[in-house]
Amino acid sequence: MKYEAIGLMNGCRATWLTTVEGEEYLQLLELYSQDVQKNQPISGFRKGKAPLSVAAAAYGERFYTDAAEALMPALYNRGVEDNGFTPVAQPTIQVIACSQDLLCFRTDVDVYPRASLGRYRGLEAERPEDSVTEEELQEEIEKFREYHREVLPAEKQEREDDLVYISLRGELEGKPFPGGTLAGVLQRFDSKDLYPGLKDRLRGCKPGDVIRYETLVPADDPRQEIAGRRVTLNIKVEEVKERRLRLVDDALFPPAYASLADFKEKKGAELHKIKKMRADEAFDANLRAALLEQLTVNIPDSMISQETGRLLENLSKNLNKEGGITAYLKKSGLSAEELGEKVKKLAIDELKLMLALDAVAEAEGIEEPDDEKREKAAFAVVKESAVRVPSGK
């Protein structure tokens, strides 16, 4: 068997001619003939024992074309192995010549791309700063103060975050209505009115104040008995409390922190851990981008289509608990076509990174049967010599 290379178009689509003739071809035809005779015996001969010439004459013109169809899959696989290709899609096979003397066919198939990679050592990539500033620590202290505000009695309501506790009795046409009596309920000024106009009536109120007023309940109010109707509200202010920020001193902090200095030290360590993790992730992402700038490759459409389909299938599985792709599209505002394009871009980026790391692994002689481990080892080589550039420089 011999091959005649026609070309490797764009480094990812191989085309070659396979020719089988002479003794090798006769042996293949003999085996084919014996196999066919098992199901279609020839009169006067035991199954599989009729000579090749007799079988060819008995089966007529279709004998050699049928033989070609039966033989080509195995011959194609041999051609792939002998040429060192890795197909990524189904081949297109075309018979060129088929007779008693030879079989010649053409193969066109998308193959694993041959990538060209420039330098991969000493690449520069930005890495954000991971040190914790005094300003960030002060922000954490203020968050702590806000969360641990003191709640103290107040003479009257003055601030938007003051707490006003009231008792309320509502009347509809002079009579109490179901659910209209409340005791010790909280009306906050940074939340929705319990009844229309209530917050305005309570502004500046003092404990013990009594307020009576009429209001129109909105028609879409879920309380059907009073929706769209005018009610009278009788209100008594029980308590007014203010939420006061505490002083920044050692007493501000709970036993988990021995002092203000201890809080800053521990909180600083927590922030640094988080910032370092994020900085490392950003550096890795920037380094991958820098590596891809060194890559020259043409990825076959079939390979992109397969990877896009795989990513979409994974996305669909992950979204099953959230209503599936349809619900996701509605929530995100994307069309199916827009989502497809986003996933396709992601597929291309992932394939390029895989091919770049494969090129590094080949250059470094990294032999690891597990794809994920091989790519991880290759990236470690790139990262080891990389130059970390502070962001903004």
Image (cartoon, rainbow, N blue to C red):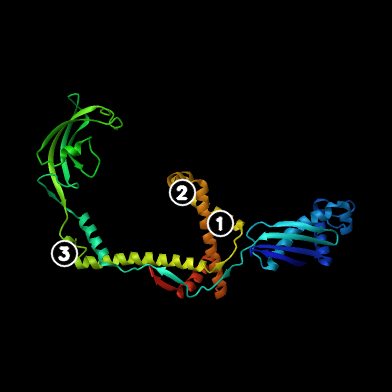
Q: Which sits in the foreground, 374 or 32? A: 374
The 10 Å Cα crowd at callout 2, few under 14, some 14 to 19, many 20 or more, is some
185 sits left or right of 115 in the view: left
Mark 1: secondary structure: helix
Question: What's the amino acid at mark 3?
Answer: Asp
Q: Earlier in the sequence, mark 3 or mark 1?
A: 3
The residue beneath circle 1 is: 307
Q: Position of residue 390 (x, y in %)?
A: 38, 70
The disc label shown at residue 48, or none: none
Q: Position of residue 172 (x, y in %)?
A: 20, 26
The residue beneath circle 3 is: 250
Q: CA distance from mark 1 to mark 2?
A: 18 Å
Of circles 1 and 2, the one toward us is: 1
Q: CA distance from mark 2 to mark 3?
A: 48 Å
Q: Position of residue 222 (x, y in %)?
A: 30, 32
User: Which residue is situated farthest in the front direction here?
Assistant: 393
Question: What's the amino acid at mark 1?
Answer: Glu
Question: What's the amino acid at mark 2?
Answer: Leu
The residue beneath circle 2 is: 319
Q: Earlier in the sequence, mark 2 or mark 3?
A: 3
Q: Which sits in the foreground, 221 or 391? A: 391
User: Is the Cβ of the residue at disc 1 closer than 8 Å to that at disc 2?
Assistant: no
